[in-house]
Image: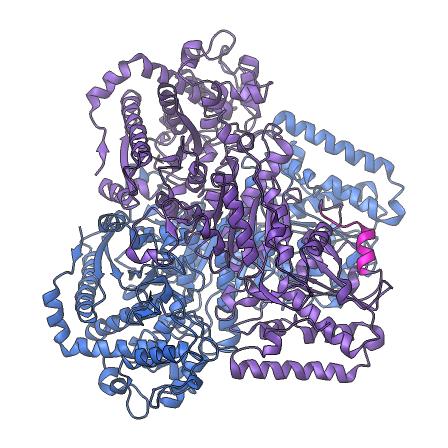
Chain colours: A blue, B purple
Amino acid sequence: MSKHSRNGASHSSALESDELRLVDAWWRACNYLAAGMIFLADNPLLREPLKADHVKQRLLGHWGASPALSFVWAHLNRVIRREDIDVIFMAGPGHGAPGVLGPAYLEGTYSEVYPDKSEDAEGMQKFFKQFSFPGHIGSHVTPETPGSIHEGGELGYSLSHAYGAALDNPDLIVACVVGDGEAETGPLATAWHSNKFINPARDGAVLPILNLNGYKIANPTILARISHEELEALFVGYGYRPYFVEGSDHAQMHGKMAETLDAAIADIHAIWKKARNGRDTERPRWPMIVLRTPKGWTGPKEINGHKVEGSWRAHQVPFSDVHNNPANLAVLERWMQSYKPEELFDESGRLRAEIRATAPSGARRMSANPHANGGMLRKELKMPDFRAYAVDVSQAGKILHENTRPLGAFLRDIMRCNMETFRVFGPDETASNRLQAIYEVSKKVWMADFLPEDEDGGELSRDGRVMEMLSEHTLLGWLEGYLLTGRHGFFHTYEAFAHVIDSMFNQHAKWLDICKNHVPWRASVSSETILLSSTVWRQDHNGFSHQDPGFIDLVTNKSPSVTRVYLPPDANTLLVVADQCMRSTDCINIIVADKQKHLQFATIDEAIVHCAKGIGVWRRASTDEGEEPDVVLASCGDVATQEALAAAAILRERLPELKLRFVNVVDLFRMQPDSEHPHGSSAREFDSLFTLDKPVIFNFHGYPWLIHKLAYRFHNHENLHVRGYKEKGNINTPLELAILNQADRFNLVIDVLDRVPRLQSRATHLREDMRNAIIRHLDYAHTHGTDKPEIAEWVWPF
Amino acid sequence: MSKHSRNGASHSSALESDELRLVDAWWRACNYLAAGMIFLADNPLLREPLKADHVKQRLLGHWGASPALSFVWAHLNRVIRREDIDVIFMAGPGHGAPGVLGPAYLEGTYSEVYPDKSEDAEGMQKFFKQFSFPGHIGSHVTPETPGSIHEGGELGYSLSHAYGAALDNPDLIVACVVGDGEAETGPLATAWHSNKFINPARDGAVLPILNLNGYKIANPTILARISHEELEALFVGYGYRPYFVEGSDHAQMHGKMAETLDAAIADIHAIWKKARNGRDTERPRWPMIVLRTPKGWTGPKEINGHKVEGSWRAHQVPFSDVHNNPANLAVLERWMQSYKPEELFDESGRLRAEIRATAPSGARRMSANPHANGGMLRKELKMPDFRAYAVDVSQAGKILHENTRPLGAFLRDIMRCNMETFRVFGPDETASNRLQAIYEVSKKVWMADFLPEDEDGGELSRDGRVMEMLSEHTLLGWLEGYLLTGRHGFFHTYEAFAHVIDSMFNQHAKWLDICKNHVPWRASVSSETILLSSTVWRQDHNGFSHQDPGFIDLVTNKSPSVTRVYLPPDANTLLVVADQCMRSTDCINIIVADKQKHLQFATIDEAIVHCAKGIGVWRRASTDEGEEPDVVLASCGDVATQEALAAAAILRERLPELKLRFVNVVDLFRMQPDSEHPHGSSAREFDSLFTLDKPVIFNFHGYPWLIHKLAYRFHNHENLHVRGYKEKGNINTPLELAILNQADRFNLVIDVLDRVPRLQSRATHLREDMRNAIIRHLDYAHTHGTDKPEIAEWVWPF
């Protein structure tokens, strides 16, 4: 089932070759630099005897994963040069940054983007010192690292990022080193199945390289401790052709790796060729490599009688106490000298030309490949005019429409105009979310087996560009990989289960924040736009476990410079918001919009004006006629807006003299001061909407306290009374769920009565009518299983 | 490698047997009930011709997964009875609740816990009507379902829950049906590796049954569309012995399933026996079953020319429009009659005795197994006296100690006293989090291969009860399964990466909320206690990606009746809090405590008093001497408290006349009103601490706005000024990171100067000194890579 490279004889002869001797030299230089980064503050080329003073005060960094990373890099370089191929590098064990920074420095890229880290002794000293040093770079492959689109600080996403980068990049190979620690995470364990979504006729290839170095921080890894037979079966089961490169002897390993990499690259080229000749539409068995090497390979074998190389002790700094223990200082010097720096670097401290020549040059360098600074390759989306998809709203509040359906048609045409640079991602719910118009131009990609019945509405195709898999992790990983290599995409998911990818959101937000604000050489990439649908308020049979609007709470914790949250109340505002999101760069846009039928309020022109402001008075629903109102009724979110409008309708009918101002919020961050968020409101803007002292009843889509968290700095905050979801629910009709959380029209009317001073002890009838309406409607729901038609199909009566 | 059951002849003869005929009848009854739940409001036994009026107004529920679930249940019943074994059932596709509710009803358990759903026509009608009906039960296996400890509303956790239930339950078999949709999720994909952590000598067994019904909501599933060879290799690779039961012919499938289940149970017994005779300590190859059945099996084959059985169209309600389309009504009647209800139910509507007898009785019923109502089996933890582990704090603020280390010793002795009912779970960081004392009594369980070097500090053992795997999902799933079956546990993880399990937290909180407040027959289970360590403020080389204190934000969105958050400032308060958490029930306790060295303030007796209040004035750090202060300086969290205390020390020295009150918060929910949370403060309590009108500077561990979100209802909120983490960071020394976020001692002093009216335009020197101190300390950090010793080893000077 797999090819073993176990012919020692041929390998050592292979290593005899000049080529591999130079690869080895290049690798030794990498390892030397990796050790230097962790340990040295000075004397970078060890041209004088090592003294404690030369060693960093505080030793920080991860040695364990580094040598294998640069081993892979060095060997990839050999193939890239020979075959002139386009390859980027993904370091799953990103905490092995020394193993990636070293190559970037040796290829000259590091000095190009950071000229003070020049290719000489002085630059090398700075390069060493900055590593894991306060105010400088981290011990992961952070955005500051040229050639990186994957930090690897949090583990689990390397492989899905790699596959995302390979989509629609027909000549690109993404070499993805997966650590055996990371391989234990759920997201990684399922990402192996991404090979069922890669079409060799038009996508590139991912070459996964599982590095079994055997250990995590303090434990062995599972995959390093199962039998060869199980390991091989696992990857055959995942659909790969596994190659094994196992050992520690440098010479033999160079030979094996070279041979294996040649075979794997040949496999990829054969697969591409076959598919592109139209001869094969079957899912191929892509190659992958199991690289078993000692943890901390080439490092000290033993310290104080404890095994270090090939042990968890090599995970971070392999030994400390260098300042006070001369023995350890000697170990360090001996170790670093074992790489023979004098053979590697010339007088000035620059890598010798002959060794340097083993790496490719220009954009072929993995550290300088433009795919890894995707904004360089990004082309603007060709955008159809969103106005063309507008719902006809000749009378506001009179018709019901599924808010997301026009968006589906809009996405369809974005796809049509950008077939090779745009994809839509969602876990099995594109149709359920009413976005199925997109299938008219592109089906769901499916490289696994087909059955005859797929013809009947299956919407599957090897050529499809809609990505559906029941793994939010994999989907978002693909999208991030796709965006960071300069393309465009749209992700939609179940609101409650967006929490599955909370941590991925956090990491991507941090990545963008650093790129945007601290790494000037990174070009802008398209924003990540996430539609949360199947929202909390419409879980008619899924119930409590599916009710969670808290993802946006998380979003408001991340940097304002990269976070945007929109809650369009109807189909046309959703179109405007989506258009804006798809054009934006370097942000994460969250759109919350339910897929069910909702009242339509804004014509497309009104929607444009309203969304441009992000917050505004809805005159039609207001009775203050521009004067100071008695009360402000505000809403944010589709169902929340419907209920607030229904409350306004009741109040208008029953208390015609009440001066009510109706405010709607589309752009959530308008509720924050402009000192806190670029979309924030000035105090004047906020005061002019919400008054200085009148009661404000705010009906919110999410957890009510989020509004307080955003708005607490504003005047009149003490009169701001927010309703929203309060974790009360089960199997409920929409109105019943709103009632349980006091976010329904009747409770909102009562709120107004309770808070407008002159009504507090009056309007007894109205108050009683509201209480009775609640009882009556709950009775109806519990008898019939639905809301009364007058609720379910409620239209604005004015 | 695996056994195929493909001998059709022997199976049909097997079905000839009375036994399997009765199993089939029992299964037909289940399917009849499942269809009835989805469709019928009345006429439950179809004793009169079906009319549109008998059909529910709104059709909701999932049919697709139901028949296979009850098929497995029926066959398990056969083995349970024959072998008198202890089995619980886990429904991964929990949205196939009809396939689980039916069995629970047929076994009589449902009527025992809900007497109005009696075993007769009237009860059956109520049983049908309540399903997916407003105010009643959901379409997942929710806590209201007897026999369930896994709702399956969110997919991904069935297998880890199953393994958690099997730990330390030597005679228990957990039959876990995994849906092929769920199998695509990351958490599920890695949970298969749980078999490397199950010791057959003292743990029970999990029998995974992968149900390949082929479809998700609208897509085929990956595992159903790969070759048999790949599928088999995958499970061999995961370490199982896969059995295959594939087909749709009822007779043949009964024969195959019976034979296969017999073989699998025999495997389990053989593995147990071998291990318990001490003859084998190797990791066994546990059996698992691949059950390939049509989606919506036994349902309508086709509707309007579209395939339904065996298609994604069977996922939810297989056809609608029953009220207005007589043809569909006839399909429904024909379908339900195909199960021959008159053969199944007697005159009164009760399952006929002969069929009934195929199910076990009493506690052997999977629907009534006490393991699935674990509180029934739960024994109180035997708790050592936490005082014994206290750090000696003879002088407050004078010594540094790792806060989590004494907790490690405490956990060690809890383990010692409760070896069979307590486990500790964490991803590879028990030692890193300074909890390694626990290894003195129990190592890390490891059933994969051993190497000689493991002897040297590997701390691995087949007998261990510390669970470490690099998958937070799997670990938390194990813990939840362990707790819900009546045991006790402790989970610790990296603060930033707690977000990986956000969604699991949400689901468990919802589960507990329902159990505690709405399901009186559920006995209390132990709380889930989660220590967040390696916190935001000490990411000295991991940097920005590892800085995220937002998990507790998420916690504050869930029901106050089940959520608790503690931020003990030192080792002794941590001990008190941990003791309290380990004794508690039905909650999720979050403890945030860093592992690094911190100043120690409270003697154990002081800690007891302080934690009992949860919030209080620290007189030693205050200068208000019980009078109304000029300013309140408050803190919550270890590093936050240290910096606030250092600020207080500076102010005491430089402004001895300033009346400062120092408040520390251990129990975060004390910052909420008592109307909102059971641990909340009354307005009087709050006012007495924070005054009615004095400035309050609050230094918080987490995102500062969380405090506003909690406290906005209190008086004096407008004077509450909170510092905390604001997403500013990189590779920083501790002080540098605090400075970047203005949560350091110097900025806090400036905050006080800015906010105490009489100091605003004075104290110019002090203000300037603070600014200079910031510059000086940053300079030092950037030169030396560490904080000045006077910062790193700062002690309270009074």
Relative to B224, residue B793 above or below: below
Answer yes or no: is residue A702 visible. no
Range drawn in magenta: B679-690
User: Taking A247 as reference, is B395 left or right?
Assistant: right
Q: Main secondary structure of the magenta part?
A: helix
Residue B203: x %, y % from top left: 40, 37
User: Taking A543 as reference, is B716 left or right?
Assistant: right
Residue B482: x %, y % from top left: 48, 39
Q: Is residue B472 magenta?
A: no
Residue A306: x %, y % from top left: 34, 65
Residue A158: x %, y % from top left: 38, 61
Quadrant of the rendering where the C terminus of chain A is positioned: top right
- Closest to the observer, B29 or B170: B170
Q: Quadrant of residue B626?
A: bottom right
Question: Residue, x 31% and y 31% (percent of image)?
Answer: B273
- Closest to the observer, B121 or B513: B513
User: Taking B512 as reference, is A478 left or right?
Assistant: left
Question: Residue, x 52% and y 27% (percent of image)?
Answer: B146
- Closest to the observer, B618 or B106: B618
